[in-house]
Amino acid sequence: MLITRALMAGLSDVGRVRGENEDQFLVADLNRSMTIHASTLPVDDETQLYSGMIGQLLVVADGISGAPGAVVASQIGVGTVARYVLNTMPWFLSLNHDHDDDQEKALLAALLEVESAVEEQARVDPEFAGMGTTLTMAYIVWPRLYVVNVGDSRCYLLRDGTLEQLTHDQTAAAQLVEDGTLSPEQAARSPLSRILVSSIGQGMSSFRPDVYRTELVSGDRLLLCTDGLTAMVDDLRISRMLGEGDTPETVCQALADEANEAGGHDNITVAVAFCLEPMERQT
């Protein structure tokens, strides 16, 4: 079986205007392991066995400014996703693409877990009433890419020099573009682009996650980012920098620097993956 080989990195920068960084990110390899304490098999006690990588995970979250507990909401978001994927999501779904629909349901369940955790924290601590966050998650199980999104953080795919935004911004401006009321250029300049119509927290009525699925090929590059990048740097420049970077680390730094040079009006968070040639799983 082919397994994922993607180089990954992430970076979060407070920007030049905000006094606090309300963004969070995570990039992680997902593996299975077993610690054997005792067995009739010919292994030593306390032997730890590892399987090959079963997937890779990238997450970005942007706590909603203007609401109390923005940092707490984004921390809960990323932390809950990590725990759910590690402890709850059935790993065997990753091994058989016949279970694609079940895999999507499992990832949506992870976001429901995040929504519940954020709402519960707001309920028990009135200081955080109304807190919320965006969250964009990419789960790679070669060659599948699953993306789940709530809010206006984004996931981009760069392939053969062409940049595609896989997610749709869940904003008032984006809705008007879909209705034909605004052009994409008008929406980018509209203050309605800052108004979320879907988020984690702030009441269940605003929680409307989207899920996307596509196939990756060697050479693809992925970018997850908060709007601190996209509000400052246009897609053409993002495409060029994502394609020209030598490593995920240098791309992350270059994008953050570019957003800061353009004004750095918000926190800037990016997570980047370079997809390499897949390799056979060891059995």
Image: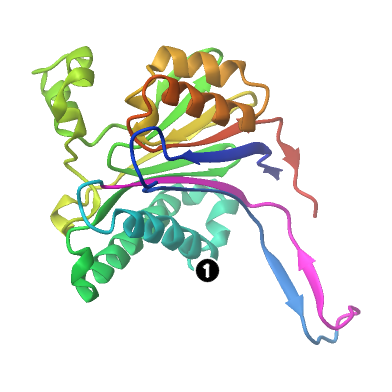
Q: Nearer the viewer, residue 231 or 184?
A: 231
Q: So how many labels did they put on this image?
A: 1
* Quarter-of-image position of residue 167: top left
Q: Compared to 225, does 141 lie above or below?
A: below
* Quarter of the rendering occupied by the C terminus: bottom right
* Quarter-of-image position of residue 40: bottom right
Q: Nearer the viewer, residue 10 or 213?
A: 10
Q: Compared to 157, does 63 lie above or below?
A: below
Amino acid on which disc 1 is placed: Asn
Q: Nearer the viewer, residue 153 or 92?
A: 153
* Quarter-of-image position of residue 186: top left
User: Which residue is pictured at 20% across the width and 52% down the height?
Assistant: 67
Measured from the top left, where is residue 213 in percent x and y?
43, 37
Q: Compared to 64, does 249 lie above or below?
A: above
| Residue labelled with disc 1 | 87
Asked if residue 227 lies left or right of residue 25, the reply is left
Measured from the top left, where is residue 71 in percent x and y?
35, 55
Measured from the top left, where is residue 94 in percent x and y?
56, 52
Residue numbers of the magenta segment: 41-64
Q: Residue furthest left?
A: 181
Q: Nearer the viewer, residue 259 or 211?
A: 259
The answer to whether residue 126 is magenta is no
User: Which residue is pictured at 38% across the width and 36% down the height?
Assistant: 226
Disc 1 crowd rating (10 Å Cα; few below 14, some 14-19, many 20+) is few
* Quarter of the rendering occupied by the N terminus: top right
Asked if residue 133 lies left or right of residue 123, the reply is right
Measured from the top left, where is residue 65 in percent x and y?
25, 46
User: Which residue is pictured at 42% across the width and 40% down the height?
Assistant: 14
Task: Tell me the SS state at disc 1.
Answer: helix
Asked if residue 144 lies left or right of residue 103, the reply is right
Asked if residue 212 lies left or right of residue 69, the reply is right
The answer to whether residue 42 is magenta is yes
